[in-house]
Amino acid sequence: MTGGPDPSLAPPLRKALEAAEYTVETVDDLLGERARAALRRHETTPARRRTADGSPLATLARLFVLQLPVGRADADRALPGLVDDLADGGVLLTSADEVRAVLDCRPYSDDRHDWWVVSDLTPGLDGQPLHVGADHVLGVTPASTSLAQLTTRRQVGRALDLGTGCGVQALHLSAHADLVVGTDVNRRALAMAHFNAALDQIRVDLREGSLWAPVADETFDLITTNPPFVISPATGRRLVYRDSGLPGDQVVETIVREAPSHLASGGWCHVVANWAIVADRPWDERLAGWVSDDCDALVVQREVLDPSSYVELWLKDAGRHGGPGYIQAYDEWLRWFDQEGVEGVGFGWVNLRKGGSARELLDHPYAVEQPVATAVQDWADAQHAEVDEGSRLTLRAGVVQETRGDPGAEHPKTIVLRQRRGLCRHRQVDTVEAALAGASDGELTVAQILDALAVLLERDREDLASAYLPQVRSLVREGFLTPT
Ligand SMILES: C[S@@+](CC[C@H](N)C(=O)[O-])C[C@H]1O[C@@H](n2cnc3c(N)ncnc32)[C@H](O)[C@@H]1O
């Protein structure tokens, strides 16, 4: 593999990072909330003040997270006997008495593992001009963590991380898959993923190639991908981490259309993506057309950006803001959106499970319980639950009822059931649905609850059943009620 650090450096580097106790927790504690918040805004000044004691932990944080030069003696204390090797290996740059990072190396974790991730340096700290190379390898981004939280953590046999980059999803997958395959078109990314696998003592089968080509005839129990999803005319300079080279949202369409043929029965594919919202066509209708008939599909639109905000975001990401050609590039991108009838860009999640045909395409910009993977699995199970009058149902933990109305009025004007867990949906219901939900204690059957309600409300028992059984099924599908 070309372009990454020499993997033989991984074991001694790991030893030094462990000895310095360079973990997410210790770095977070060292920096404190205010400096961490500033770093999220790409400002290092508050963090500089918290990392000046020359300890190995502070030195590593200054070197890699803040991208500051550190004294040679401090660097030698933090990375004993390794500084020259890491400089030869392309991780550090040394001068007479100073050491700088050439690559990022920072701790990363889930609730059971401490890892480290090497990637290219975060560009643009402290307002410096952004210079991003065409083959830039991203570290862990908000889209990476969003995908990690979406991905099922059930034990599986074969897992695929399509567009692995520095290998962050592969790290997570390695904790619950017997075999992890990671693919990428960017050789530098594969080299970093290779190094990170050695650093974190995991096994990943890394393969070079575009989209499904490296796994042409293979199937997986789990596919996870954060593809280069930026929607553009695909005519300008390509940044491989975000531009697929295909116009519009074709890369996402291709992935969603072809994923089912690479899924084993019952296998899951999770995608984080952008999609174009085009004139005169509801977004959900367009995306539903991409999903094959042999999959359950839960597609969640989390955010919508208007075309101008979207173009600004990605031109700034590429360091073009205020530079030569900025206005022209902005104008061309907007003109192309107009030509294509793009009226907005959706960001969200596509989840496919091979073997069913349930569909839900949901506009859901609300907070969800993380990791949301559990709610996605529950969704799929609920779509196939058999619910009839003999079913015993239970109100899901965390569902509350909210009522609104005029003060002193006998009846509320609106009743809302709200989930405080999982997808955190809410749904307006009538008094019968609310009573059905409230009485679902796992002991009474739906029939028994309907009998009681018919008497109480003086309604015809069979009319009540035909009106409300569909509502009960829908409350189950939406995760308010669960079969006992
Ligand atoms: C947004 S990054 C995601 C990296 C990492 N998986 C994560 O979750 O942070 C997209 C990755 O897809 C890779 N990529 C770009 N075009 C590709 C293609 N046609 N086939 C496979 N991977 C591609 C890029 O090199 C990059 O590493």
Image (tube, helix red, strand yellow):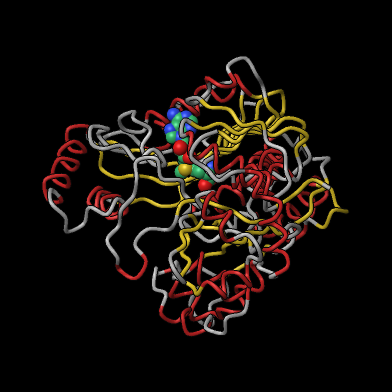
Frontmost residue, 322 versus 442: 322
Horizontal relation, residue 327 to residue 442: left or right:
left
Horizontal relation, residue 204 to residue 302: left or right:
right
Could you tell me residue 184's position as x and y percent? 51, 32
Q: Residue 351 is drawn in which quadrant?
A: top right
Q: Is residue 475 above or below residue 360?
A: below
Which residue is outermost to the top? Answer: 217
Could you tell me residue 15's position as x and y percent? 72, 60
Frontmost residue, 179 versus 248: 179
Residue 356 seen in the current view: yes
Q: Residue 360 is drawn in which quadrant?
A: top right
Image quarter in which the N terminus is found: top right
Residue 299 seen in the current view: no
Residue that appears at 27% across and 34% down: 280
Horizontal relation, residue 258 to residue 218: left or right:
left
Q: Is residue 168 above or below residue 276?
A: below
Could you tell me residue 95's position as x and y percent? 43, 65
